[in-house]
Image (spheres, rainbow, N blue to C red):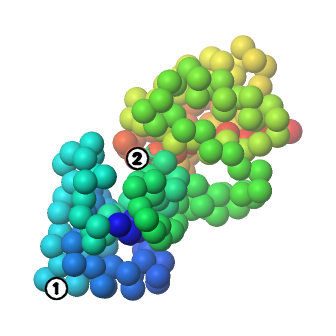
Amino acid sequence: MIVIGVGCGPGMLTMDAISRLGKASKVYGSERAIEMVRKYIPAGCEVNRIKDYSHLDELPSDAVLLSTGDPMLAGLGHLGDEVVPGISSMQCAFSRLRLPLTKAVVVDAHGKDQDAAIREMLEEVARGRIPFVLTEPGFDLEALAKEMTSAGIDCTIIVLENLGYEDEAISFGKADHLPSVSSKLYSLILVKDG
Ligand SMILES: C[S@@+](CC[C@H](N)C(=O)[O-])C[C@H]1O[C@@H](n2cnc3c(N)ncnc32)[C@H](O)[C@@H]1O
């Protein structure tokens, strides 16, 4: 099975991904992923919206599975015999902020223990890295601020919402003045001050 990265938002699909999609006969993906590539899906291709993510390893071998962003950044790449890269939320975020990816470290707080993720973020900042955090709705920014304050770590907290979409928004804050979050799709970056 081929897993194709469709980018983190509209227009973030590579030419290679477009060409592979053009040859697909069966496409599987989330609603968001399908919407991003719909115009490149050839006529007659079967399009299946995934409702149950627990049986994706049973898809037919000629299936093309769509993965938002890049499939190897907490995506569906592990299911593919072949993986076609897409522009990830991390690449997009670091480009928008003109931050060096050479200092980046990924912290996955999506569906994971949030306290452990917060500890990891702060350890990485203290080490001089720039953590890029995959979040989920309900991520507790106040808990992050509390840990930052008690660890004596001063950093700028950056919320990146809906990267690549028309309503993309980037907000900056501090532990004592948190940035606002108004959407469900967002990531975080911490940059140490000074
Ligand atoms: C399961 S991870 C998948 C990441 C994806 N494979 C990628 O390369 O961007 C989902 C998380 O990625 C982040 N994310 C994905 N797309 C985003 C976007 N357009 N804007 C901001 N964050 C995004 C969010 O933190 C979201 O909860």
Give the answer, above or below, for where 174 lies relative to 150.
Answer: below
Give the answer, above or below, for where 80 lies relative to 106.
Answer: below
Residue at the top extreme of this rendering: 150
How packed mark 2 is, by other alpha carbons closer than 10 Å (few <14, some 14-19, many 20 or more), is some
Residue 165, can we see it? no
Amino acid type of the residue tagged 1 in the rendering: Ala
Q: Which residue is mark 1?
A: 43
Q: Which residue is mark 2?
A: 185
Q: Which element is circle 1 on?
A: loop
Q: Which element is circle 2 on?
A: loop
Position of the N terminus by quadrant:
bottom left
Residue drawn at (66%, 24%) of the image: 119
Amino acid type of the residue tagged 2 in the rendering: Leu
Position of the C terminus by quadrant:
top right
Callout 2 touching callout 1 (CB < 8 Å)? no
Give the answer, above or below, for where 28 lies relative to 148.
Answer: below
Q: Nearer the viewer, mark 2 or mark 1?
A: 1
Residue drawn at (52%, 42%) of the image: 134
Q: Is residue 83 left or right of residue 116?
A: left
Q: Nearer the viewer, residue 17 or 55?
A: 55
